[in-house]
Image (spheres, grey):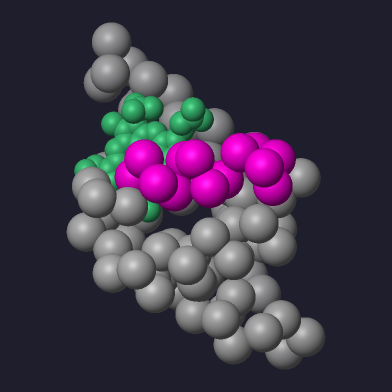
Amino acid sequence: MRKAAAILLGLAACASAPPVPGPNDSAGVRRGHELYMAKCTLCHDAVPPGDHARSEWPRLVDRFAPRARLAPEQKAEILAYLQEYSR
Ligand code: HEC
C-alpha cells in the first residue's frame, strides 16, 4: 500500500516540476528550494508546492523533517520555500 502510494506520487510529481525561485525571492526561499530538491527527493519525486495549501505545509514538513534528517534552520527554509509557492 505504501509502495503504491509512493509510485502514484512519483507519477503525479512528473507532471509539474516544482517552480525554481528567481532573483526576487529571498535568500532563505532560494536556499529552501535547493534544500528541498536535495533532501526531500530521497524517497519520492519532489511534491510540487502548489499541491498543498500554505496552511497544510507546516504539518507536512513536521512529519517529514525527521525522515529527511533536517536541521532546524533547514526545516525553516524549506517551509519558507514551500509556503511561498503553495496554492
Ligand atoms: C525516508 C523517506 C522520505 C523522505 C526523506 C521524505 N519523504 Fe515524503 N513521503 C515518503 C513516503 C513513503 C510517502 C507516502 C506515504 C506517506 O504519506 O507517508 C511520502 C509522502 C509525502 C507527501 C504526500 C503526503 C500527502 O498527504 O500529500 C508529501 C507532501 C511529502 N512526502 C513531503 C516531503 C517533504 C517536504 C520531505 C522533506 C522534508 C519529504 N517528504 C521527505 C517518504 C519520505
| Main secondary-structure element of the magenta-colored stretch | helix
Does residue 49 appear left or right of residue 63 in this picture?
right
Q: How many marks?
A: 0
The percent coordinates of residue 40 (x first, y second) are: 36, 54
Does residue 87 appear left or right of residue 48 in this picture?
right
The percent coordinates of residue 37 (x first, y second) are: 42, 63
59 lies above or below 1: below
In front of the other: 50 or 73: 73
Does residue 28 appear left or right of residue 60 in this picture?
right
The range drawn in magenta is 52-64
The percent coordinates of residue 31 (x first, y second) are: 49, 80
Tell me what residue is drawn at x 67 percent, y 42 percent.
55
Tell me what residue is drawn at x 53 percent, y 48 percent.
58
The percent coordinates of residue 30 (x first, y second) are: 57, 79
Q: Is residue 19 visible?
A: yes
Tell me what residue is drawn at x 76 percent, y 45 percent.
87
Image-quadrant location for residue 3: top left
80 lies above or below 24: above
Q: Is residue 82 part of the magenta span, yes or no?
A: no
69 lies above or below 53: below
The quarter of the rendering in which ligand 1 is drawn is top left
Q: Is residue 62 part of the magenta span, yes or no?
A: yes
Tell me what residue is drawn at x 28 percent, y 10 percent.
1
In front of the other: 34 or 7: 34
Image-quadrant location for residue 27: bottom right
15 lies above or below 1: below
Q: Is residue 10 visible?
A: no
